[in-house]
């Protein structure tokens, strides 16, 4: 089971997706604490999510933790699950109103980063951390022992 969690391919280009997803989630998580009124609690309250005080910190913490894990390529598949959930909730809670009020193309324009993060997270869930990841190093080390 543990072997499967760390499993990854030998792709050297996966680091590009890891950098994109990891940096964005890490940055957004930090900003939820630095600018809570516009990125954290205040934003969650504005879009009508329950318990915005709790959710702002909860989501920010997960974004920092998962963003860091993705950047390191450590537990990449596990770390991508919360990022997938975060992006699905973000699209459902913020883009559905744009779709209803302004139409499909405005929603697509407004959600381009959301889709990139969703699909990047899905890619990492499927493929793992790639060659330059701690997951790869751990699996390689485990095989030697």
Image: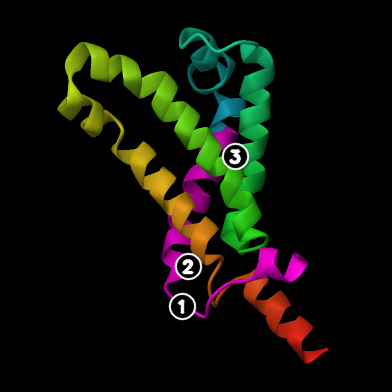
Q: Secondary structure at mark 2?
A: helix
Residue 120 belongs to the span the image colors magenta = no
| Residue tagged 1 | 12
User: Mark 2 and mark 1 in contact (Cβ < 8 Å)?
Assistant: yes
**Left or right, residue 30 beside residue 114:** right
List x then y, in percent, for residue 98.
27, 18
Q: Secondary structure at mark 1?
A: loop
User: Mark 2 and mark 3 in contact (Cβ < 8 Å)?
Assistant: no
* Image point (22%, 11%), residue name: 101
Is residue 27 visible to the viewer in this orientation of the structure? no
List x then y, in percent, for residue 126.
50, 61
- Residue 119's place in the image compared with 54, above or below, is below
The range drawn in magenta is 1-30
| Residue tagged 3 | 63
| Residue tagged 2 | 15
Q: Residues within 10 Å of mark 2 (few under 14, many from 20)?
A: many
**Left or right, residue 55 beside residue 107:** right
List x then y, in percent, for residue 138.
72, 76
- Residue 32's place in the image compared with 74, above or below, is above
Classify residue 62 by image quadrant: top right
* Image point (47%, 77%), residue name: 11
Q: Residue furthest front?
A: 1
Q: How far apart are the two marked residues, 1 and 3, measured between alpha carbons?
A: 24 Å
Q: How far apart are the two marked residues, 1 and 2, measured between alpha carbons?
A: 7 Å
If you read the primary sequence from the N terminus, does the residue marked by circle 3 or circle 2 appear first?
2
* Image point (46%, 78%), residue name: 12
Tell me how the rendering is colored.
rainbow
Q: Secondary structure at mark 3?
A: helix
**Left or right, residue 54 beside residue 11:** right
């Amino acid at each position: 089971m543990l072997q499967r969690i760390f499993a990854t391919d030998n792709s050297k280009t996966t680091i590009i997706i890891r950098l994109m997803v990891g940096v964005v989630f890490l940055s957004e998580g930090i900003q939820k604490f630095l600018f809570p009124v516009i990125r954290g609690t205040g934003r969650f309250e504005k879009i009508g999510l329950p318990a915005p005080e709790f959710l702002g910190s909860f989501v920010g913490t997960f974004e920092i933790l998962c963003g860091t894990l993705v950047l390191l390529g450590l537990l990449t598949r596990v770390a991508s699950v919360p990022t997938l959930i975060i992006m699905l909730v973000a699209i459902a809670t913020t883009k559905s109103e744009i779709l209803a009020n302004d139409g499909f193309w405005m929603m697509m324009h407004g959600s381009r980063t959301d889709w990139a993060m969703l699909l990047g997270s899905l890619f990492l869930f499927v493929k793992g951390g790639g060659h330059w990841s701690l997951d790869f190093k751990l699996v390689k080390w485990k095989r030697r022992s």
